[in-house]
Image (tube, grey):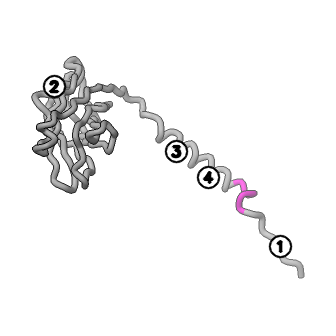
Amino acid sequence: MQEKQKKPIYKKWWFWLILVVVLVGIGGASQTGGGEEQSLSGTVSQPSETQLSENQPPEATPTPRPETYEIIGDVAFEDDGFACYLTGTLKNNSGKECSYIQISFNLYDEDGNQIGTALDNLNNLADGGTWKFKAMGIDTTGDVASWELADISAF
């Protein structure tokens, strides 16, 4: 008696259906959902020689757009040897509640090379509400000499 040979899996109709569904799902997940996204840029502040020699935290002055999101006061930097943190307060002046908001900073060494990113995020920030963020970056070597506000995204 002759045995019936099975078709390879890639020749079955349900294999292609599953593949199409997975690819469509991946494509949809990589695009921003129907929400509105807003961004904000900052500036890099190079530390003085005194700051570098005394191993003081770097300082930067972001230039927020007060009509959308406003960083209130200074952003502080701290490094505990395992991670570094940029902390501050952000106010939502966008005129609407943010379902999701994220702040990110680029981290630089003393030569200006980017060595990492620090970020924090929050859900449901009310219009006019404030958020005490603590953006964390992995910095086990303590090489952060300056930082730059890279982005504030919200929807």
The residue lying at 47 percent from left, 35 percent from top is 31
CA separation, marks 4 and 1?
Answer: 25 Å
Quadrant location, the C terminus: top left
Q: Is residue 139 above or below residue 128?
A: below
CA separation, marks 4 and 2?
Answer: 45 Å
Q: Nearer the viewer, mark 1 or mark 2?
A: 2
Residue 128's label in the rendered image is: 2
- Label 1 packing within 10 angstroms: few (<14), some (14-19), many (20+): few
The residue lying at 14 percent from left, 41 percent from top is 57
Q: Is residue 11 magenta?
A: yes
Residue 26's label in the rendered image is: 3
Q: Earlier in the sequence, mark 1 or mark 2?
A: 1
The magenta segment is 9-13
CA separation, marks 2 and 3?
Answer: 35 Å
- The quadrant holding residue 23 is top right
Front position in the image: 135 or 30: 135
Q: Amino acid at mark 4?
A: Ile
